[in-house]
Image (spheres, rainbow, N blue to C red):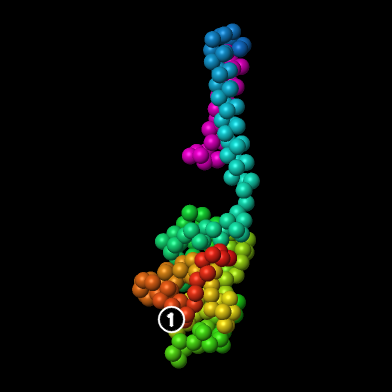
Amino acid sequence: MGIGKETLLKILVLFSVIAISLSLFFYFNKEEYLFWFSMIANVIQVILFAVWFLESKVSGSKPMSIENIEKLVIGSNANDWDFTDENGTYTYKNDVNLVIKRSKDDEGREFAEEWAEVGLHKGITAHYDIYYGISFIKKIYMVAVDGYRAYIPYPKSRTELSINLFQYKFGKIINDCYEYAWGKNNFDNYLRRLKIKIDKKKQS
């Protein structure tokens, strides 16, 4: 609905005060027509209260599930996120409760698997955490390759080089926010270069 809950509640309270005051005034002054007019106002007040109550119930009764968060990530792209490079934070523009943060856990540790080696550069761990409000949702394990020129999600195994759809879309968001430095399609180019396949049938 277009009217915010707080605004609707303020209108409701103001309307209630006016309607009740007028009803009492007209009743004691025996202004029958005006009394019925004020009663109509009271009915409108009840309707407004019902709208406010339903809006509060709808917005409060549907908590964001992990599955819904994953769907939001899959359905978004880098333009849907506000990126702050200084602290590695990505904020979802359509719901600022949804935030991706660069994790400090095991950050910068050498990643020994052969698939992550590009030229003379070994892979370096660079994980990310997803939060909704103050709630931690999940950690996404990634590897910085080729001297931090791309961030690649962990494939299924060191020999089975595939990632699911969620990992792919997440990786696109992380990498495409660096498009100004690395150019377009950088993530996809590195996936091909590292021979990592995308299993789009498996979402997460």
Q: Residue at x 53, y 33 (%)?
A: 11
Label count reads 1
Residue 119 inside the magenta-drawn segment: no
Q: Residue at x 51, y 61 (%)?
A: 73
- Residue 33 placement (x, y as % from top left): 54, 10
Residue 4 inside the magenta-drawn segment: yes
- Residue 24 placement (x, y as % from top left): 61, 17
Locate residue 153 relative to residue 134 in the image: left or right: left
Residue 104: tell me if it is visible.
no
Looking at the rendered image, the quarter that the C terminus falls into is bottom right
- The relative height of residue 50 versus residue 56 in the rendered view (above or below) is above
Decide whether the magenta segment is chiefly helix, strand or loop.
Answer: helix
Q: Residue at x 60, y 70 (%)?
A: 139
Q: Residues within 10 Å of mark 1 (few under 14, many from 20)?
A: few
Residue 94: tell me if it is visible.
yes
In the image, which residues are magenta?
1-26
Asked whether 77 or 54 is in front, the reply is 77
- Residue 25 placement (x, y as % from top left): 58, 15
Extreme-front residue of the structure: 201
- The relative height of residue 95 versus residue 203 in the rendered view (above or below) is above
- The residue that label 1 is drawn on is 193
| Element assignment for label 1 | helix
Q: The disc labelled 1 sits on which kind of residue? A: Arg
| Quarter of image, res 19 | top right
| Quarter of image, res 183 | bottom left
- The relative height of residue 82 versus residue 153 in the rendered view (above or below) is above
